[in-house]
Amino acid sequence: MVVADQSQKHPSHTLTPGDLLRAFGQRTKKQFGQHFLVDPSILEEIVRCAGLKPGDAVIEIGPGCGTLTLTMLQAGAAVDSIEIDRDAVEFLQEALPPAWGFTLHPGDALKTDMAAIVASRPGPWKAVANLPYNVGTEVTFRLFELRETIGSMTLMYQREVARRMVARAGDDDYGALSLMVELYADAEIVMSLPPGAFVPPPKVHSAVVNFEMLPETRIEDEARRAFFEKVVKSAFQARRKTLPNGLKALKLPKDQVVAAIESAGLSPKVRPERVGFEAFLAVSDALRG
């Protein structure tokens, strides 16, 4: 077991991610989607992509055995980590002292009051995490709710999910998720990683997405935003059909739907994957009246 000197006021630079992984041993749990990064060059590149500098406040979800956490602490960041796995919690409490700027929050990130965490010290905050893949998208949208405090996010996903998040109209991966992300942030893939970069290796490739939060969402009015989301999700239920067919789930008269599409400068024969954010918003606004 790695037991840090609790009296140390600064992160040890002799402690390595490999030390943490070896000490954690065979306690990885499939149900929590645990796949750990151990290569220092990869971890340092994630920190670089996140733009971390000494004194930054970071919220991390799913630290696991703490390899990314350690790298962020060594970069001078103060890190608040949420961890659901009791074995990992016990391990981290001994391996990474609070004196290093580390605060551990045991529990499920989807049930944790993240707003209270980011209110605990001055911002702006950053979110940096190798997210558990089974809850990555849901956690991301919880973090979007904290956009007034969190200025940027650098998060790991399955590569397919990452591609859907950053896709634009006309891309193969473009869909409802792409548009929902565009509501809140400018997003781009900044790293791609093969399964072999992780211990244990997952069955899929992974990618890191950087999100620069918008000061305000692209649709500030809540009722307008809710209807836009309804229109987008309806349209992509039948992404290979024309937009009027995709919008049948709204249960509006067909002539009203066609008129709204044409008012946005689109052909009624257009498919959803060819319609960009502003055009979708124009259709939504026309349908809403």
Image (spheres, grey):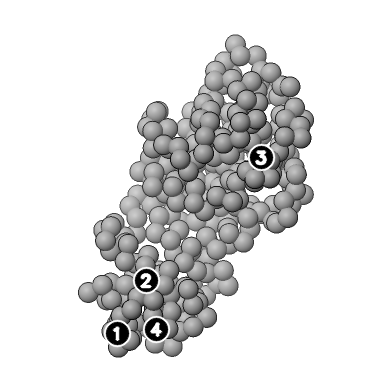
**In which quadrant of the rendered image does the C terminus lie?**
bottom left
204 to 129, vertically: above or below? below
- Residue to which mark 3 is pinned: 43
- Residue to which mark 4 is pinned: 244
Q: Nearer the viewer, mark 2 or mark 3?
A: 2
Measure the C-alpha gap from mark 2 to mark 4.
11 Å
Q: Are marks 4 and 3 in contact (CB under 8 Å)?
A: no
Q: Position of residue 56 (x, y in %)?
A: 48, 32
First-in-chain label (4 vs 3): 3
| Location of residue 10 (image quadrant) | top right
First-in-chain label (4 vs 1): 4
First-in-chain label (2 vs 1): 2
Q: Give the structural element (helix, strand or loop) at label 3.
A: helix
- What residue is drawn where x is 57% and y is 36%? 84
Measure the C-alpha gap from mark 4 to mark 3.
46 Å
- Please give the label number shown on residue 253: 1
- What residue is drawn where x is 62% and y is 61%? 160
Q: Position of residue 175 (x, y in %)?
A: 50, 69
Mark 4 residue crowding within 10 angstroms, few (<14) / some (14–19) / many (20+): many
First-in-chain label (2 vs 3): 3
Q: Nearer the viewer, mark 2 or mark 1?
A: 1
| Location of residue 207 (image quadrant) | bottom right
Q: Are marks 2 and 1 in contact (CB under 8 Å)?
A: no
Mark 1 residue crowding within 10 angstroms, few (<14) / some (14–19) / many (20+): few
Residue most extreme to the top: 7
Q: Nearer the viewer, mark 4 or mark 1?
A: 1
Q: Give the structural element (helix, strand or loop) at label 2.
A: helix
- Residue to which mark 2 is pinned: 231
Amino acid tagged 1: Pro
Amino acid tagged 4: Pro
